[in-house]
Amino acid sequence: MNRREALSSVALLLGGTIIGSSAFLSGCKTSGSDAAISFSADEISFLDEVGETILPATSTPGAKEAKIGEFMKVIVTDCYEPKDQTIFKDGLKKLDEASKKKHNKSFMESSAQERHDLLVELDKEAKEYQQNKKKEDPNHYFRMMKELTLWGYFSSEVGATKALRYVAVPGKYEGCIDYKKGDKAWAT
């Protein structure tokens, strides 16, 4: 099974809940294709900081170490529909504007606690929006960022081997392994 087939299987298991999940089933554009948008190095750094605020480094590496900004750039430019690309890209400006409105400084200038508080508010806003939106309404930009952060982190080498329990495959099959409260989930 190749990576594309594996991602298609994951999309089917998730029931297509990830925004842009049709890319799993139909495949993404090749990296040489024309992208409707592009990301600057500053925007990728911004996405790294958003990801690090969502999944900060603790006893395990954070999202920044998984290069989450680069992952988001690739998925958005290669897999998202043009309308979702625009929403995502505009969301970078909206997030920064929300930070300026709340803290009188940009997201990048804000402290870790200020960033956290802002993203908690945006997460609540996104949940309410998603619950009340009509099918034809656009997706919420922060939901996209959060989903891509989680997907990118837990499918990265860092996330799979350091945040989750990892056993290199192939290995022997063990159909029943005891789970102890507090154990990490399995990556394999």
Image: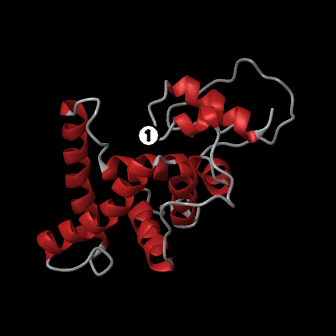
- The answer to whether one can see residue 183 in this image is no
Quadrant location, the C terminus: top right
What number of labels is visible?
1
Whether 16 is drawn above or below 73: the answer is above
Q: Please name the residue that numbered disc 1 is placed on.
A: 19
Whether 117 is drawn above or below 81: the answer is below
Drawn side of residue 61 relative to residue 8, left or right: left
Display coloring: secondary structure
Q: Please, what secondary structure does the residue beneath circle 1 have? A: loop
Q: Nearer the viewer, residue 65 or 84?
A: 84
Q: Position of residue 68 (x, y in %)?
A: 53, 61
Whether 95 is drawn above or below 163: the answer is below
Q: Position of residue 123 (x, y in %)?
A: 26, 48
Q: Nearer the viewer, residue 87 or 104?
A: 87
Q: Nearer the viewer, residue 140 or 56?
A: 140
Drawn side of residue 172 relative to residue 127, left or right: right
Residue at 86%, 33% (x, y): give it. Answer: 171
Residue at 28%, 76% (x, y): give it. Answer: 111
Quadrant of res 60: bottom right
Residue at 40%, 53% (x, y): give it. Answer: 145
Query: Outermost residue toward the top?
Result: 175
Q: Nearer the viewer, residue 56 or 143?
A: 143
Q: Position of residue 172 (x, y in %)?
A: 86, 28
**Amino acid at circle 1:** Ile
Quadrant of res 185: top right
Q: Position of residue 179 (x, y in %)?
A: 59, 27
Drawn side of residue 37 relative to residue 179, left or right: left
Residue at 68%, 50% (x, y): give it. Answer: 161
- The answer to whether one can see residue 124 in this image is yes
